Image (cartoon, helix red, strand yellow):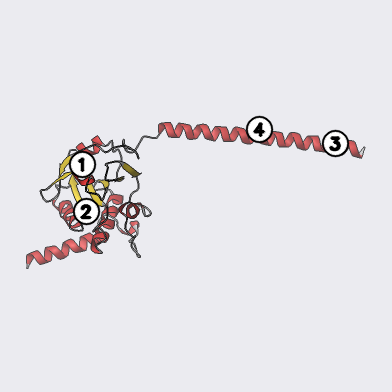
Amino acid sequence: MSAVFWQAAVAIEGVFLLIIGLLLAGVLRYLGSIQDRIDLAAPSVARLQPGDHVEPFEAPTIGGGSFDITLAASDGRGLVLLFIAPGCSSCKYLLTQLDELGQRRALQGAARAVVVVASGAQDPEVGAQLSVVAESGATIVLDEQGTVANAYGVRVMPIGLAIDPEGVVTGLSWNPHAANWLYEQLGVDPPQDPVSEGSVGLVYPAVERRLRLRQTEDRR
């Protein structure tokens, strides 16, 4: 009687474990199908991907100059191309990061930082703030009509593209302001006491202070 009982208990346990295994396999397959649908539905944030060659373009820069990406990429340093929109809080934080790098002269000798501004640079206040960031050593490219962004298939901002001296994309981020992506791509050390993104708000604190100081000096 005891042997029969234990044999039945073992058989029931085996059936129970088999049912659990089948259920778990079904759940995993279902989750996998959901992920596949998400991957298919999710739009690419930029047409260019790591390994692609950049599209050549020439565009005006703030201050009246001109920028040619083909020439810039071939100077031996490589570059980091950053697509931003002035009204985007994450984009403003990205500019704050660049301004901080310029203040400690970290951009000298690093990969070239190139900021492509989608629109709004014609606004006097935005233009003045971008001019201050340009003084930090970053190149500010004006893309008022979205020509460059469209050529690169940029659909959201900010977007960061790291480009080597051969003009090949080596890195892509749709959160270039997050973690240490920007610093790693530029080949520079991050700040010891970084400004939190939440404290940036609707203005660039460090940029704003420097702009006011410059305006005060200009009035003297």
- Mark sitting earlier along the chain (1/3): 3
Question: Whole-Å distance between the Cαs marked 1 and 3?
Answer: 77 Å
- Mark sitting earlier along the chain (4/1): 4
Element assignment for label 4: helix
Question: Viewer-nearest of labels 3 and 2?
Answer: 2
Q: Quadrant of the C terminus?
A: bottom left
What residue lies at 89% left-to-right and 35% top-to-bottom? 4
What residue lies at 30% left-to-right and 41% top-to-bottom? 168
Question: Whole-Å distance between the Cαs marked 3 and 2?
Answer: 76 Å
Residue 59 at x, y = what percent? 16, 42
Residue 111 visible, this orientation: yes
What residue lies at 34% left-to-right and 57% top-to-bottom? 198
Type of amino acid at the residue the image marks with label 1: Thr
Return the residue at label 1: 70
User: Mark 1 near mark 2, Cβ–Cβ under 8 Å?
Assistant: no
Please identify the quarter of the rendering in which residue 179 is found: bottom left
Type of amino acid at the residue the image marks with label 2: Ala
Return the residue at label 2: 138
Q: Nearer the viewer, residue 86 or 48?
A: 48
- Mark sitting earlier along the chain (4/2): 4
Q: Quadrant of the N terminus?
A: top right
In the picture as drawn, the residue positioned furthest to the right comes out as 1
Return the residue at label 4: 22
Residue 67 at x, y = what percent? 16, 45
Return the residue at label 3: 7
- Is 126 placed left or right of 31 in the picture? left
